[in-house]
Each structure stands twice: as C-alpha cells, then as structure tokens.
C-alpha cells in the first residue's frame, strides 16, 4: 500500500508506504516482494519510503470465521482459513491500515526496476482506483485488484467489518469483489482507471515490466516440487498425486532466486526464517541449496 499526505494547496508527496497482504503460506514470497520494493522504489525526490506487510494471522476475526459459508465463482464453499489464497479479501480492508492514496499488491508481486517517477504520474490522475482490466473473450469483465492504486479518501468503507459482512453474511461472490464489479464495494460514483499491463505483468518478464506478478500458483519458483495434496485453490480440491511444477520461463526463476539471494545476503531474510518455512512445507525443501551463498546450506 502506498500512502501519501495531501496539502491543501495541492499534491505534496511526503511519505510512501508499500503494503503487501499475505498469509502464512505466502510469508516468504511476501518478504521477497517487500525486499523488491525497498530495492527499486528509490527515494530520489525527497520522499520517505517505508514498507509494511499485513498478514491474515494478525487479525483474529478471520480465524474465527473458519468453516463459514462463502461464494466464489458462483459456487458455495466453506471458508478455508488455511488456504494459500485466504488472504485475498485483505486487499479490501486497507482503510484499517492507511489513509490517502495507496498502492496495494499481492504477496507474489515483485518490482523489477525503479518506478517512482511513473508512479507519481499515475497518482496525479483523478481516478479513485487504478487496476489492470480483466478480459473475458473480446470484452472487459472487470479489473484485476491484485495490484491497485487507490484513493482511500473516497473508500473509507473498505475495512474489515465491511468486507467480512459482504463475504460471510451477505454471501457476495468473492470473484466479483476481486474483479471490482460488486456495486457496494465500488459504487457507480467511483471512477476506475486502466493500468497498463506493465504494472501487473502476468508471468511475463521483459523490458517493459515494472511489477511482475507470478499468477500461476502451480509454477511459483519457491514451491517447485511440493505436493499439492491437502491444499485447496479456488475452492477446488487438488489432485493428491500432483506437485507444483517448474516455471516455464528460466529468466523468471533466475530473477526470483537472485532477488531472494540478495535479500539473504543483505540480512533482510534470515536462514532461520527459511528453515521454518521449509519445515512447514510452505516452500521447496531445496531452496537453501539454490542460493549462491555456500554458507546457507545447513543440515535440516
């Protein structure tokens, strides 16, 4: 989440805070995401840059909602607090954590180059929300809220109480929330601008990419080789004989592990954190051996 203050005489950027929402399954990717923003969101215009992660486990009301009925993609299911995607509604609770204008990202979104100047240009627009459009065949069916620039001054209802009522009591389809098509989440007076794909690049890394989004959970590099048994994705039971696969783009694999290696070498991510997540079966067991530093190969 990117926040800034507004002075009465016009836009005056004072502070930028990057907020990544996550859950325990995605703690490592969220940490690497945070590191990427610290690396590439350079403060060269007198702006204070801070970063923050909000996790599902930090809010007990979500834990207390386990097994309640929800709807996603038109199908009713039980709320799975331990699902790898359980953190998705947190992106609509951001008024609890910030004010002003924000940049909200998923834990599998990574900055790949400096982008502060381009970001400030987008912030100067009059849109309440900016996100990448979602296509359904030849027509637009909504927006992808996994990366959003948001003006919270006009979205103070985006809080935990509101979104939990929408999801659990009113049974609003979570997919409509994610696509920003729910009329109560985004009333008709809320203007939504279109973000260029470079701000939410789906598993595509090239010279135009600003934010890389590893959208395919089955090929995320930090999970390769882990079994899918016992996990639920999009309310669908996975094949118990299936495993997370190797990402088809070797450049993306190398990018992620180079970024992780830098985070470790800079003491932003420590070995104990990696070992803990390996033992929880949240990340691939050989991840330490894939790092460049030979000092990061303990016996687990």
Image (cartoon, helix red, strand yellow):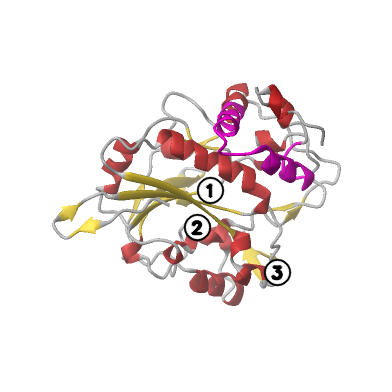
Q: In x, y percent, where is residue 148?
A: 42, 50
Q: Residues within 10 Å of mark 3 (few under 14, many from 20)?
A: few
Q: Does the magenta stretch include residue 288?
A: no
Badge 2 marks a residue whose secondary structure is helix
Q: In this view, does 35 lie above or below 26?
A: above
Q: Residues within 10 Å of mark 2 (few under 14, many from 20)?
A: many
Quadrant in which residue 242 is drawn: top right
Q: Residue 201: which disc? A: none
- The magenta segment is 257-284
- Who's the residue at 56% across and 71% down the image? 164
Q: Which of marks 3 and 1 is nearer the N terminus?
A: 3
The answer to the question of whether label 2 and label 3 lie on touching residues, with beta carbons closer than 8 A, is: no
Task: State left or right for residue 266 relative to residue 63.
Answer: left
Q: Name the residue under label 1.
A: 106
Q: Mark 2 points at which residue?
A: 91
Distance Cα–Cα, label 2 vs label 1 = 8 Å
Q: Is residue 179 above or below residue 79?
A: above
Distance Cα–Cα, label 3 vs label 1 = 22 Å
Q: What's the magenta bit mostly, secondary-structure-wise?
A: helix
The answer to the question of whether label 2 and label 1 lie on touching residues, with beta carbons closer than 8 A, is: yes
Q: Mark 3 points at which residue?
A: 66
Q: Does the magenta stretch include residue 270?
A: yes
Badge 3 marks a residue whose secondary structure is loop
């Amino acid at each position: 989440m990117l926040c800034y203050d507004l002075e009465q005489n016009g836009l005056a950027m004072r502070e930028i805070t990057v907020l990544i929402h996550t859950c325990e399954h995605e703690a490592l990717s969220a940490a690497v995401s945070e590191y990427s923003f610290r690396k590439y969101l350079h403060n060269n215009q007198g702006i204070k840059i801070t970063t923050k992660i909000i996790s599902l486990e930090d809010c007990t009301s979500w834990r207390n909602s386990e097994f309640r009925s929800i709807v996603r993609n038109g199908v009713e299911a039980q709320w799975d607090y331990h699902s790898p995607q359980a953190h998705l509604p947190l992106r609509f609770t951001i008024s609890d954590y910030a004010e002003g204008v924000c940049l909200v990202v998923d834990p599998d979104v990574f900055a790949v180059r400096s982008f502060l100047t381009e970001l400030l240009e987008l912030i100067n627009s009059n849109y309440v929300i900016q996100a990448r459009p979602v296509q359904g065949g030849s027509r637009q069916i909504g927006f992808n809220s996994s990366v959003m620039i948001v003006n919270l001054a006009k979205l103070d209802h985006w809080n935990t109480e509101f979104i939990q009522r929408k999801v659990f009591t009113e049974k609003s389809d979570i997919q409509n929330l994610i696509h920003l098509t729910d009329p109560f989440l985004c009333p008709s007076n809320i203007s939504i601008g279109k973000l260029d794909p470079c701000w939410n690049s789906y598993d595509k890394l090239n010279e135009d990419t600003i934010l890389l989004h590893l959208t395919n959970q089955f090929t995320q590099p930090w999970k390769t080789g882990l079994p899918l048994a016992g996990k639920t994705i999009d309310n669908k039971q996975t094949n118990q004989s299936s495993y997370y696969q190797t990402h088809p783009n070797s450049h993306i694999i190398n990018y992620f592990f180079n970024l992780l290696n830098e985070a470790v070498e800079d003491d932003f991510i420590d070995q104990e954190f990696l070992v803990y997540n390996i033992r929880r079966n949240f990340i691939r067991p050989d991840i330490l051996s894939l790092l460049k530093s030979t000092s990061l190969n303990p016996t687990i």
